Amino acid sequence: MSSLREIENTLTSILMERQPVESAQSLSCLLEDEKFDTEGARLYARLIGYGHNDVISSIYPYCAKVLNRSWERTVKQYVQVFPPDHFHLNSSARRFPRFVSENCHELLEKWPYLAELADYEWLEMELLEADTAISVTSKTPLSDPHAFVTLGPVTNPTLKVRTYKYPIQQIVDLIEGGKGFRKKFRPEQSHVAMYRDPHSHKVRIVDLDDNAQILLSEADRSSYGDIARRAVELNPKRDPQLTVTDVIELIEQFHDINLFVGERKIGT
């Protein structure tokens, strides 16, 4: 008797129409005897197909809404190009952003942001399932001048930052509001920070401007004072005192939302 993996591969092939259900030779691996239930195989293959479609739709709901009537056909094409290679169904959807980027040129002509939208949605799923412990420790008030130069933040260990060619967060917000499906978005670089909250265990998403993205990318090797100085460098035409005030507020906000989860002594 063959393994469940071999059985699923065969039935997925039937579903994807890569081999006929009546092919006794291709299906002989499924049975110990000579009897084969053709209609049962078709039904089970369809159920596998429904399972793939449901899983991929649950991971990429925004892509599904954008593509609308083209969605089921696109999912079927995806499974044909990238058949499941892991017993964990969610993992079977991980290559969908690559599939869109490499195989969906007609769709990208209509929705050029689609591959980035798929990446955004997969990243959220990846963080939900990340087996990463998050420890939150106390912080020292930044009103303490000594702390300002001797301490630096610790970023959430699940943090991922993406830079996109399109305003992905704006696109997502419009889709959630039932709008924007036919809107033509011009390229507009955007930065998105995603991480898992240590208390709610939900994924949090923060839209960053260019300067905040730079400061966040350097935070793990900087003191609070270094971050403030860098912010002043990035805003040479602005009053330095106002910039420092704003960056202190930004640091406090990052701590409040658990994007920063603690602090470290500089040099350790």
Image (spheres, rainbow, N blue to C red):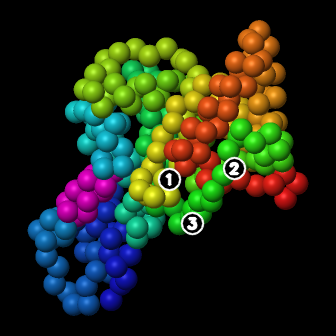
Q: Position of residue 134 (x, y in %)?
A: 57, 62
Residue 70 pos. (x, y %): 27, 34
* Disc 3/disc 1 C-alpha distance (Å): 10 Å
Q: Which mark is residue 196?
A: 1
Residue 46, position in %: x, y? 19, 60
**Amino acid, disc 3:** Ala
Can you see residue 243?
A: yes
Q: Is residue 181 left or right of residue 117?
A: left
Give the SS element for disc 1. Answer: strand
237 or 33: nearer the viewer: 237
Residue 133 numbered mark, or none:
3
Q: Earlier in the sequence, mark 3 or mark 1?
A: 3
Q: Residue at x 70, y 18 (%)?
A: 242
Of the residues under marks 1 and 2, which one precedes in the sequence?
2
* Residue count near mark 1 (Cα–Cα under 10 Å), binned few <14, some 14–19, many ≥20: many
Which image quadrant: the C terminus?
Answer: bottom right
Across and down, in percent, residue 94 comes to 47, 53
The residue pinned by badge 2 equals: 140
